[in-house]
Amino acid sequence: MNDLQKRQILIFVTGWIAYASTYLLRKPLGVIKSDLPFSQVELGWLDLALLMPYAAVQIFLGSIGDKLGPTFTLAVGMILSGLALITFSFWTNYLVIFMMLAFSGAAQGLCWPNVCKIIGSWYSDKSRNSMFGFLGASAFGGGIAGTLLAVYLQWKYGWNHVFFLPSLISICLGILVYMLLKMPSDVNIIVPGKEVTLQSLQKQSHSLLQLWRIPMVTEISIAMFCLKLVRYCMYMWLPLYLTVHLNYTKEMAGLFSTIFEIGGVFGSVLLGIAIDKFFGGECLVGTFASSLVSTVSLLLFFLTGKFGLLFNAVFMVIAGALNCGPDTILGGSLPSEIGDSNELNAAAAVTGLVNGFGSIGACLEGPIIGFVSARFGWDGMFYFLLLLSTLGTLAIYRARIINTKLKKIYLPLVNEDGSQSA
């Protein structure tokens, strides 16, 4: 193993653990919802408090990592997100809890675009999807760990103590990130198979309108909006649904809800590998098929909900794998590739825009699902999720059509020997 491979492993493992830790701060809210002395609508607004600032920061400040440096930006985001919630156990006032969640969410918004930019810079373009598939598993692995840790802390110390240890972990890892994570250009390393230009080494900024006009950005943003709303609904409401509608115990509901994320771990990894190995790097073909089957699996979970634990587990793990798999590609690999194209050096900015727009769907799930479930019942909630999953699938299909047209336009510019025509 050469020095480059050792450094790649160090960078990847550190980045993977760092981003996974942010889910230790997101998952407790879903676990303790049944303990909080607030109405169902107020609980939905707490989801909004955490996720709206997260989305806004990614959309409007996604390029900050391109300007200040991704390592510094990531470290600051992790430290601030932990500091925001470390005193959670001291408070019971709704407004104070709302503000703490909002500040932590805003700080977490700095993390994903910059993790993508750092780790993506260390791997060849040919292995991009596989690498992002493994990186994306950090979100679902972190989600599982976050839920299990929150369930344990809730049982052992009470609901108001579930944020202290995760906050401490996030702060410590933020310091570690600042010490260990470097870009190849910081250490004068050229990664084989990674095209590097003078323009790509310069710190740049791009307007939101410029980024939005890039082909396929609108479509993959809409797809992320729909798929992420569905995903976060499962994160934030599945334990409560299992308790109220399917009569699970509170502890069992918290543990069972991790099945969706267990599927997500496998889906993220396997989809990235499948795209590189079997689809020739065609992201949109694999993500379209995955999203389509995920929609069907959600429908089957809904229809067989009363059939028992086995049926619930099978369809939930399939839905999790095939909903979460595209999330990593559409929110990481593809926008990062688009941002690096044409010497834009906007990998963090485009990734932030796409993932941030998707996170608007995540933050809106709170008040929307709270309202829909209160007004139309749990059945109405699932019909709504099925509609959104279908719309997300169609958006991916449209992006695929655009990509095909672009290839037809630029294909004549390439000669048979692979050289470019004049």
Image: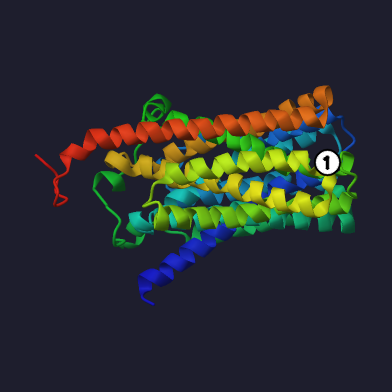
Residue at the spot 56% in from the left edge and 39% down from the top edge? 292
Residue 24 visible in rendering: no
Closer to us: 28 or 270: 270
Kind of residue indicated by mark 1: Leu
On the rendered structure, is 340 left or right of 231? left
Q: Residues within 10 Å of mark 1 (few under 14, many from 20)?
A: many
Residue at the top extreme, as displayed:
375
User: Is residue 267 in view?
Assistant: yes
The colour scheme applied to this rendered structure is rainbow
Q: Residue furthest toward the bottom?
A: 1
User: Quadrant of the image for the C terminus?
Assistant: top left
Q: Say which residue appears at 60% left-offset and 59% top-offset.
A: 173
- What residue is rendered at 51% in x and 43% in y? 289
| Residue 100 percent coordinates (x, y) | 72, 38
| 190 relative to 393 in the view: left or right | left
Name the foreground residue: 309 vs 378. 309
Nearer to me, 271 or 157: 271
Tell me residue 177's x, y (percent).
53, 58
> What residue is rendered at 13% in x and 45% in y?
415
Determine the secondary structure under disc 1: helix
* Residue 405, percent from left and from top: 31, 32
The N terminus sits in image quarter: bottom left
Q: Is residue 104 left or right of residue 420?
A: right
Q: Residue furthest left?
A: 422
Q: What residue is shown with label 1?
A: 240
In the image, 55 versus 254, the foreground residue is 254
Question: From the viewer's perspective, is residue 201 above or below residue 380?
Answer: below
Residue 279 placement (x, y as % from top left): 40, 51
